[in-house]
Amino acid sequence: MECHDLSSFTKIKINLHFGVMEHAFEPLKNDLIIRAAWGQKVERPPIWVMRQAGRYLPEYHQAKGTRDFFECCRDPEVASTLTLQPIERFAGLIDAAIIFSDILVIPQAMGMTVEMVDKKGPHFPNPLKSPDDGQYAEVMNKKVDVAKELDYVYKAITLTRKKLQGRVPLIGFCGAPWTLLCYMVEGGGSKIFKEVKTWIYKYPEETKALLQKIAEVCVEYLALQVKAGAQLIQVFDSWAGELSPSSFKKFSQPYLEYIAKHLPRKLKEMGLDPVPMIVFPKGAWYALDAACDMGYNVVGLDWLHSPEQTLKTVGDRPITIQGNADPGVLYGSHASITEVVEEMVKGYDWANRKKGWIVNLGHGITPFVNPEDLRFFFQEVHRLTKTD
Ligand code: 1CP
């Protein structure tokens, strides 16, 4: 009889009831968001908020200490601790964790230097200047080893899944190619987007080649996140709203579609089951109709959309909407929070539909919000969607 040592056993794929998985994790005790993302009827709408692990939480500052931001991302122990903080604080009220990382790890993996400047945000000391600049050729020609360069993210995901012990699903994410391109050429956040507008209107073909390169990295990166244990994925197109309807069709949509088409194929090749995919094209209100046909299961909306109009636009397509309270309401009174939740519950026709909605803010939670006001938001969603 053939003899196997135990270590090779632990490495082989374990065929669980749910399909072939790379790791053995505890079964989910709360899979509400996964069922809602697949479009199933659910007992109540799942809730999480973008940027739920971060600066508004005192425990975030305490755990981070004086460490550099990217140092936290690269340390699986720290990253998993930060990911779990909102899950622990809001236990029983929150339905998903999102891995603590940043969208800008992809430009780093592509060979660019990105620093996180305290109280200012991301900074690229050497942004891409123009297609004639040697750095463009370098980035385009670099064979990105996505498995090696971002190994720390996969390790953080696997460790987080273990620590979660099935409490809630874990979301993996990446930045959309358009949004990443903005940072790579602007060198950080921007108000007028001078550089990236120069790129799209002066060098459209070179811009598209770079977007395609980023999209390919995104697919591989997301697939490896799923292999490591991510149970849903979200693509953040935070700067989609800087494009016109026509330029969105040229410089964002094709690459979002590429990811939605190729990720499931890649997962299949890897022997992994598909996971629900969320797209968040922030500010691109004109693209809601198109976003419903881009191949994603969930479309995340900012607060510029009314739920009623959204439902009309979605029609009978099997799309779940995620969102979309104005994050600013968390600076307001509890009466205002209640009103905003009531408007969403009514607007998404929850009492009749019981599907197609994941509750979230319309963008990330902002610094200086009192976490207890977020708790009140969660509690109000639970209270106003309870079925006896
Ligand atoms: O709970 C979580 O969501 C934490 C994980 C997370 C995610 C999903 C972080 C941690 N960043 C992100 C995504 C991210 N990063 C986006 C997409 C979401 C969005 O639009 O908000 C974007 C645009 C970034 C880029 C980025 N990183 C910014 C924005 C700068 C700008 O141009 O306006 C900032 C400030 C960061 C730093 C960052 N990322 C995450 C945290 C907790 C922080 C703050 C770091 C600190 O000061 O301690």
Image (cartoon, helix red, strand yellow):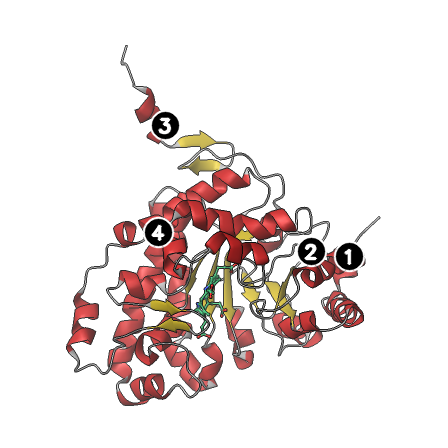
**Image location (x, y in percent) of residue 329:** 69, 73
Q: Tell which of 175 and 253 is nearer to you.
A: 175
Give percent across and percent down for residue 275.
Answer: 48, 50
Q: Are the residues tagged 4 and 1 within 8 Å (C-beta)?
A: no
Residue 331 visible in the picture: yes
CA distance for labels 4 and 3: 24 Å
User: Dot 2: what SS?
Assistant: loop
The residue at 53%/34% (across/down) is 26
Q: Amino acid at mark 3?
A: Thr
Q: Which residue is mark 1?
A: 385
In the rendering, which numbered label is found on residue 45?
2
- Going from N to C along the chain, the mark reached first, 1 or 2, is 2
Q: Check the picture and name the quadrant holding the N terminus.
A: top left
Query: Looking at this rendering, what residue extends furthest in the top direction?
Result: 1
Q: Amino acid at mark 1?
A: Thr
Examine the image and state in which quarter residue 348 appears. bottom right
